[in-house]
Every structure is written in structure tokens, then in C-alpha cells.
């Protein structure tokens, strides 16, 4: 259902969004808020499951503005993710 909605925005039509996500071979951190009513957490979870070896972090008390609502904790999560992939 979520992927179908994303497909509408795929102008290139070369690969479905789902196929494109499955082929990513770079470290990916998927972040979302459990209280997000604009982009539900299920959307983040689905993206996480499609991207091999991705990391998912859902913030329990965050809505749609995770970088504002959980700035300090998000900063820690991003730094840990970057360090774990030697990207920092």
C-alpha cells in the first residue's frame, strides 16, 4: 500500500521504488516518529525491510518533525550510525 503511493512519484518509471530500495548497497539509516500521522511508522518499517542491512530508529514520542522533536537523541543515533560505518 505504501509502496504503491510512492510509485506515483516515480517519474523515471525505470524501476519501481520498491525495486530501487532493494538494490541499494550503501549504509542507510531510516528514521521516523511513532506518532507521525503524515508518514506513519509503518512506512519507515517497510522501507527498512526493503533495504538490506539498513538500520531503523523509530522515536517513541516523535511526530513528523524528528530532527526538531528529538534533536539531541537523533544526533546521537546519527553519530553512532556514521561511526559504525566508518563514515564520521
Image (cartoon, helix red, strand yellow):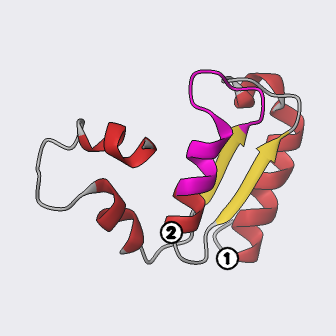
Which quadrant, please, contains the N terminus? top left
How many numbered marks have been drawn onto this rendered protein structure?
A: 2
Residue 25: image x %, image y %?
Answer: 44, 78
- Helix, strand or loop at label 1? It is loop
| Residue 72 circle label | none
Magenta range: 33-46
Q: Is residue 24 left or right of residue 34?
A: left
Q: Quadrant of residue 48?
A: bottom right
Residue 28: image x %, image y %?
Answer: 57, 63
| In front: label 2 or label 1 | 2
Q: Quadrant of residue 49?
A: bottom right
Gap between marks 2 and 1, in whole Å?
16 Å
- Helix, strand or loop at label 2? It is loop
Which quadrant, please, contains the C terminus? bottom right
- Is residue 64 inside the magenta stretch? no
User: Which residue lies at the image location 31% right of the left edge and 64% below the top edge?
Assistant: 20
The residue that mark 2 highlights is: 51
Q: Is residue 84 above or below residue 76?
A: below
Q: Is residue 19 left or right of residue 15?
A: right
Q: Is residue 78 left or right of residue 8?
A: right
Residue 68: image x %, image y %?
Answer: 75, 22
Q: Is residue 3 above or below residue 54?
A: above
Q: Is residue 63 above or below residue 11?
A: above
The residue that mark 1 highlights is: 85
Q: Is residue 80 left or right of residue 56?
A: right
Amino acid at each position: 500500500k505504501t509502496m504503491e503511493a510512492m510509485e506515483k512519484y516515480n517519474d523515471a518509471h525505470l524501476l519501481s521504488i520498491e525495486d530501487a530500495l532493494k538494490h541499494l548497497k550503501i549504509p542507510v539509516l531510516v528514521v521516523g516518529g511513532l506518532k507521525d500521522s503524515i508518514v506513519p511508522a509503518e512506512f519507515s518499517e517497510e522501507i527498512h525491510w526493503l533495504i538490506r542491512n539498513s538500520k531503523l530508529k523509530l522515536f517513541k514520542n516523535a511526530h513528523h518533525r524528528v530532527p526538531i522533536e528529538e534533536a539531541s537523541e537523533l544526533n546521537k543515533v546519527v553519530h553512532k550510525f556514521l561511526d559504525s560505518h566508518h563514515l564520521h
